[in-house]
Image (cartoon, helix red, strand yellow):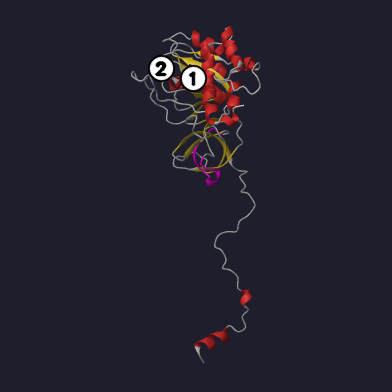
Amino acid sequence: MSPVARSAGRYADVDPDSFGRPAKRSRPRTKDRPDFTGAQTGRVITIDRGRYRCQLLDAGTMVTATKARRLGRKGVIVGDIARIVGDTSGDEGTLARIVEVEPRTTVLRRTADDTDPSERPIVANADQLMVVTALADPPPRPGMIDRILVAAYDADVAPILCLTKADLAAPDDIVAQYTPLGLPVVVTDPDRALDEVDELLSGHVTVLVGHSGVGKSTLINRLVPGADRSTGAVNEVTGRGRHTSTSAIALRLPSGDGWVIDTPGVRSFGLSHVTPASVLEAFTDLADIAEACPRGCRHTSDEPECALDDAVARGDLTPERLESFRRIVGALVEQSPADSH
C-alpha cells in the first residue's frame, strides 16, 4: 500500500470541520475594567525622566511611581491628583504605579509661540496663578505679564501680580497700570516680610510663573524654608535671567494649608491655544469700553471705528495699555483670522 493510501485510511473517520484555529496564547479580552478601589490617592509633586514623585494625601508619604501606558504621554502632569497602586511604602528603591488621574479642575497651558499648534500643559488643579516680575534687573515686561494673565483667565485660574526687587526700583507705575484689572498686586523686597503674600496663598494651590531671573525661586525659598530651589543672576549683557529651575515642583506651605508650584522660568509665552475673542476677557478694564465697538470689531489697530481708540483720545485709556492688548490680539488674529470675530 502506498504512503498516500495509508495516510487516507488513518484519517478516514475524522471530520475536517472539527478542526478550528489554534488557540491564542494571550488571555481573552474583557470589558471588565481593573478594580483600583484599594489604590492610594496622591498629588503629583514633580516629574523627572519618566518617574513621578507623589505625596500621598492621607499619610503624607512621598513615593516614586511610573505611569500606566494607557494614560498617554501627557496623561500625568504636576498638580494632578492620581490613584496609585503597588508599593506605596515610600521605602528607598520601591516603585509604585499611577493607574488613574482624577478629573482636573483646571489646566494651565501655553505654547512655544503664537504659531505653535502644540499645547503644553504646565500645571493641573491650581486655583491661583501668581505672575512674578521684577521691578529691575531685569526690568518689567508688561507684554509678558499680559500674556500670562490671558492664559490664567483662559484656564479659569485667579491671577495675582507679585512685584519683586522693590529695593531696586519703585513699583508705582506698574501698580497703577494693573490696578484697573482688579487683581491683587503685592510688592516684595529682600527685607520685607511676606505676610501679605502668605495670606493670599493660604488655602489655595498657587502656581508661580514668570520669566527667568525675576526672583521666583528666591521667593519660593522664603515661602518654603528648606525648598532649596536654585537661584541665579541676570546676564549683564542681555538683561535676561538664566534658567535655574528645570522642572515644575509642588511644595506644601509650612502652615500645611495650601500649596505653591514653582515652574521653570520662561522667555516666551505662546497663546496659540487661546482664541482672539477670549483675549478681551483678560483685559477687564478694556472690556467695558469695547462694548461701544461696532459689531464684528476685532479691536486691532486697523479697525476704523474701534471704541478703544476713542478711549485713548479721551484720555480714558493709556496708549501703552492698548498697545499691549493689541500685540496679543494682533498675533492671534494673524494666526487664525477665521476666529477673530
Q: Toward the viewer: 257 or 208? A: 208
Q: Residue furthest left?
A: 237
Which residue is tagged 1?
143
Q: Name the image quarter holding residue 79.
A: top right
* 32 up-or-down from 187: above or below: below
Q: Name the image quarter holding residue 81.
A: top right
Specify the segment rendered in magenta: 59-73
Which residue is tagged 2?
138
**314 is within the stretch colored magenta:** no
Q: Position of residue 140 (x, y in %)?
A: 45, 16
* 151 up-or-down from 290: above or below: below
* 282 up-or-down from 59: above or below: above
Q: Residue furthest bottom?
A: 1
Look at the numbered disc 2 and give the secondary structure of its residue.
loop
Q: CA distance from mark 2 to mark 1?
A: 14 Å
Query: What residue type is disc 2 on?
Result: Pro
